[in-house]
Image (cartoon, rainbow, N blue to C red):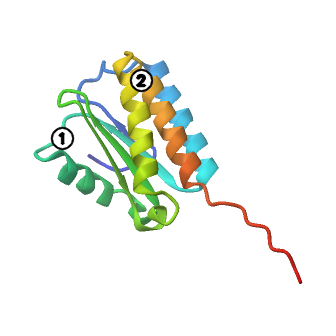
Amino acid sequence: MTPRRARLVELVAAGDLSSRERADLDKAIRAAEQSCRFEFSVFIGGAEGDSRVYARRLHASLVAPNRSILVMVDPTARVIEVVTGPEVRRHLTDREVELSVLAIQTDFAANDFVGGLKRGIAMLAEHARPQNTLHVGS
């Protein structure tokens, strides 16, 4: 795998996603990055060995892993892994990641693969977005 920017979609077979589906995912990733200012990557394909270890290795190979969120989906093994960098973890809790993965799984179960990824990416971005705070002077 050769990392490019943060927009990364790798496929096991070239025909797994249509060009329209790839474009939809890329659009969802761009919107998420603009929303929360972190970089998103999506990997769709077979994990080599333990899926968590493989996802962490993919995440570490990204251009800016400290500021990145990787969503790895192994459709054959039916596994979803989300790996976040240290800067992201200051804004995104494990519980929020779990909720996003549950949303992805729900859409996958309804045979909406791309919709599930888009919804999960949007949820991760929403949760990771730094909160605006108002400072009131005394």
Disc number at residue 107?
2
Residue 63 position, x and y percent, is 40, 59
Q: Are marks 2 and 1 in contact (CB under 8 Å)?
A: no
Depth check, mark 2 against mark 1: the one in front is: 2
Along the line of sight, which residue is nearer the eye, 22 or 37? 37
* Residue 4 is at least partly visible in this image: no
| Residue positioned 47% across, 24% down in the render | 115
- Asked if 115 appears above or below 7 in the picture, the reply is above
* Residue 47 is at least partly visible in this image: yes
| Residue positioned 44% across, 63% down in the render | 89
What amino acid is labelled 2 in the image? Asp
Quarter of the image where one finds residue 68: bottom left
- Asked if 62 appears above or below 49 in the picture, the reply is below
Residue 125 position, x and y percent, is 55, 47
Q: Dot 1: few (<14), some (14–19), or many (≥20) neighbours within 10 Å? A: many
Comes first in the chain, label 2 or label 1: 1
Residue 6 position, x and y percent, is 45, 50
Q: CA distance from mark 2 to mark 1?
A: 21 Å
- Asked if 111 appears above or below 66 in the picture, the reply is above
| Residue positioned 34% across, 20% down in the render | 109
What amino acid is labelled 1 in the image? Ala
Helix, strand, or loop for circle 2?
A: helix
Write down the residue under mark 1: 47
Q: Is residue 133 left or right of residue 117?
A: right
Residue 86 position, x and y percent, is 41, 67
Q: Residue furthest right?
A: 138
Q: Quadrant of the image for the C terminus?
A: bottom right
